[in-house]
Image: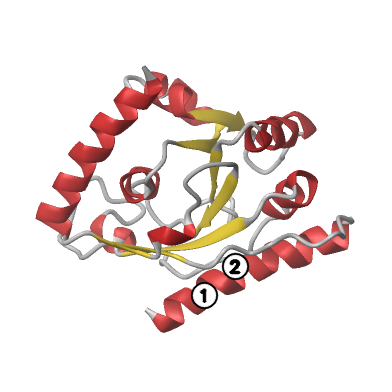
Amino acid sequence: MKFFLYRFLKITLSIFLKVFYRFEVFGSENVPDRGGAIVAANHASYLDPPVIAAALKRCPTYIAKEGLFKVPLLGPFIRLFSFPVKRGKTLPSTIKEAVSRLKEGEIIVIFPEGGRSADGNILEAKRGVGMIAALSRIPVIPVLIEGTDKALPMGVKLLRPAKIKVIFGNPIIIEKEKDRDFQERFSKNVMEAIKDLKAKA
């Protein structure tokens, strides 16, 4: 059911985004056809998760903040494609769940900043993406989302005109180190890779 619902949503979202937002995707060849992968993207809008879903060629699993699972109507969809994380506190159980799913071959979507950027600028990363990458030994694909901060900025309820594009960067391969300092450096490197994509876009 999850796969067929994803295919329906992907097609519907892609058509909508292409018609109204001139949606473009670059670098999708950097996403493996099979096996686990961590997709790490900047986050500036509630549109980011569905935009990532439309851009990916495989069904993703999201790490979503706990409160979203209680949102009327959206809650069941979020529960189907996500597992929860407490905002401001990543529990060991959340990391364990992510690592387990990655080793089972899933694509996990993470927004390393831990929340939306109010002005669209890329923020510093939390340590979570480095922890998950280090423990799973799964490559991280940095992703730049552009235009969603204009289409649906923070504090705005109605969609606005904008051009939206998604750029998948080259996978970042995890090294052997996995101590706390390494995890923080790795998380920072992921955000630097996203900034590089923005500079080149």
Q: Position of residue 82 (x, y in %)?
A: 51, 30
**Residue drawn at (41%, 67%) of the image:** 119
Q: Is residue 199 visible?
A: yes
The residue beneath circle 2 is 191
| Secondary structure at numbered mark 1 | helix
**What kind of residue is marked 2?**
Met
Q: Is residue 74 visible?
A: no
Quadrant location of the N terminus in the rendered image: top left
**What kind of residue is marked 1?**
Lys
**How far, Cα to Cα, is label 1 from label 2?**
6 Å
**Residue drawn at (37%, 26%) of the image:** 3
Quadrant location of the C terminus in the rendered image: bottom left
Quadrant of residue 80 within the rendered picture: top left
Q: Is residue 37 left or right of residue 100?
A: left
184 or 55: nearer the eye?
A: 55
Label disc, if present, on residue 91 of the rendered structure: none
Q: Position of residue 117 (x, y in %)?
A: 47, 60
Q: Position of residue 85 (x, y in %)?
A: 62, 34
42 or 10: nearer the eye?
A: 10
Specify the color scheme: secondary structure
Disc 1 crowd, CA 10 A, few/some/many (<14, 14-19, 20+) = some
